Each structure stands twice: as structure tokens, then as C-alpha cells.
Amino acid sequence: MAESPGPERNRRQAVVGTVVSDKMQKTVVVEIARLVRHQGYSKMVRRQTRVKAHDEQGACHEGDTVRLMETRPLSKDKRWRVIEVLERAV
């Protein structure tokens, strides 16, 4: 008998980022910024990662702050989906 997907689904990563591009259909590019400690100097350094996320309704626009959740591969590059828009761009 197959195992239930319950506990595995709950361990999905959720991150907050800023939409930098909304030119594709149902896809947005989101930049996730984080602080990491530099190994040599022990100073905090900003790092950015850009990911493609699935936006089914097309509700996100450039400059919006959004929450993403890890998901199964939706295309070659898409591994995230938009859960909610936290803040709209001015």
C-alpha cells in the first residue's frame, strides 16, 4: 500500500521575495534576498537568488512582494508557486 503524502507535503519551503518580471504568461520572476555571513571576514553579506514561480491568476506585477512555496517541477525552470501577494507595488 502507498504511503500518504501528508508529512512530506508539510516540509515544503516557503520564502518571501520581490517580483522583478511579469512579462510571461502565468509565470513571474521573483528575487529572493538573504543575508549570509562571509566566511573570511564574518561580515553579513547580501545574496540574491532569482527563481521562476507559477502565478495562475496573473495577479502579480513588477515590484510586488510575494510569498512562494516549493512545488513539484512545473516546467524546465519553474519549481515554485505564488501563495499570496503580501504587498502591492506603488
Image (tube, rainbow, N blue to C red):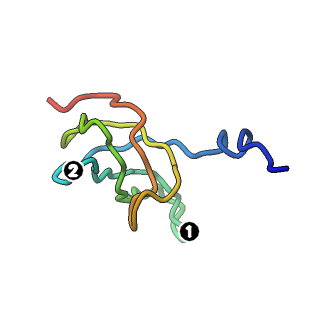
Q: Can you identify the residue that label 2 sits on? A: 25
Apparent side of residue 6 relative to residue 16 in the rendered image (left or right): right
Q: Residue 4: where, in percent of width, then height?
A: 76, 42
**Above or below: residue 60 compared with residue 20:** above
Apparent side of residue 13 relative to residue 35 in the rendered image (left or right): right
Q: Going 36% across and 48% down the picture, which residue do you hit?
A: 54
Farthest residue in the front direction?
1
Q: Going 53% across and 59% down the picture, which residue do you hit?
A: 37
Crowding at dot 1, Cα within 10 Å, few <14 / some 14-19 / many 20+, comes out as few
Q: What amino acid is at disc 1?
A: Gln
Q: Residue 63: where, in percent of width, then height?
A: 21, 40
> Which of label 1 and label 2 is nearer to you?
2
Q: Can you identify the residue that label 1 sits on? A: 39
Q: Residue 30: where, in percent of width, then height?
A: 32, 50
Judging depth in this view, the residue of 12 and 36 nearest the camera is 12
Apparent side of residue 62 relative to residue 29 in the rendered image (left or right): left
Mark positioned earlier in the residue sequence (1 or 2): 2
Crowding at dot 2, Cα within 10 Å, few <14 / some 14-19 / many 20+, comes out as few
